[in-house]
Image (cartoon, rainbow, N blue to C red):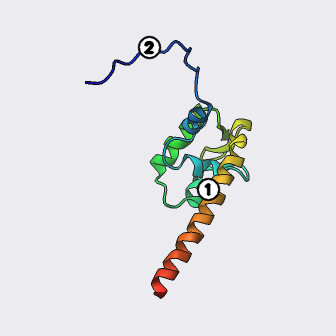
């Protein structure tokens, strides 16, 4: 039998900033979509071409979510057939240094794994 949990007398924090930012990036492919939009605005078909492994359904869902969260804007182009162009907002651009840092660590991890696998194969 454990001790009873006492009620805290400290006001809870309103929100964790780290959890809030990670919440913006939740969902498969969200960081990838932001990465692909970092250079210039892109149309849906261009994003599909840039990320061939993502399905159209998932890409559409991610773009809608990122737009709802204020990270991406959608601008309808008056073309035939009609199309839309997606771009990062200022808030979306503020995420780029963090995504770049994560990608930098990822490149180091991949290089380390490859070196480890090469050494293991040589034995």
Crowd class of label 1 (few under 14; some 14 to 19; many from 20; radius 10 Å): few
Rendering coords of residue 47 (x, y %): 59, 54
**CB within 8 Å, label 2 to label 1:** no
Q: Earlier in the sequence, mark 2 or mark 1?
A: 2
Q: Nearer the viewer, residue 99 or 82?
A: 99
Q: Residue at x 54, y 36 (%)?
A: 23
Residue drawn at x 56%, y 34% is: 19
For disc 2, the neighbor class at 10 Å (few under 14, some 14 to 19, many from 20) is few
Q: Which residue is mark 1?
A: 46
Which residue shows up at 62% across the image and 64% down it? 107
Asked whether, in this view, residue 37 is left or right of residue 49, the answer is right
Residue 7 relative to residue 82: left or right = left
Query: Which quadrant of the figure has residue 86?
Result: top right
The residue mark sitting in front, 2 or 1, is 2
Find residue 17 and report its image quarter. top right
Residue 108 coordinates in the image, percent (x, y): 62, 65
Helix, strand or loop for disc 2: loop
Is 34 positioned to the left or the right of 61 in the image?
right
Residue 64: x %, y % from top left: 54, 37
Above or below: residue 11 compared with residue 46: above
Q: Camera-side residue: 46 or 62? A: 62
User: In this rendering, does residue 36 appear at all?
Assistant: no
Q: x, y (%) of residue 34?
A: 63, 47
**Numbered label attached to residue 7:** 2
| Picture layout, residue 95 above or below residue 14 | below
Left or right, 80 with reference to 62? right
Most extreme residue toward the left, as rendered?
1
The answer to whether 53 is drawn above or below residue 76 in the figure is below
Residue 110 seen: yes
Q: Secondary structure at mark 1?
A: helix
């Amino acid at each position: 039998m454990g001790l009873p949990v006492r009620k805290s007398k400290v006001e809870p924090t309103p929100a964790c900033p780290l959890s809030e930012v990670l919440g913006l990036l939740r969902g498969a492919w969200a960081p990838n979509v932001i990465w692909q939009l970092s250079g210039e605005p892109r149309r849906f078909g261009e994003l599909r071409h840039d990320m061939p492994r993502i399905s159209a359904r998932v890409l559409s869902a991610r773009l809608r979510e990122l737009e709802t969260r204020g990270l991406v804007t959608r601008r309808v182009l008056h073309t035939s057939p009609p199309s839309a162009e997606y771009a990062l907002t200022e808030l979306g651009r503020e995420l780029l240094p963090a995504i770049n840092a994560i990608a930098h660590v990822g490149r180091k991890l991949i290089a380390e794994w490859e070196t480890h696998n090469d050494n293991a194969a040589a034995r």
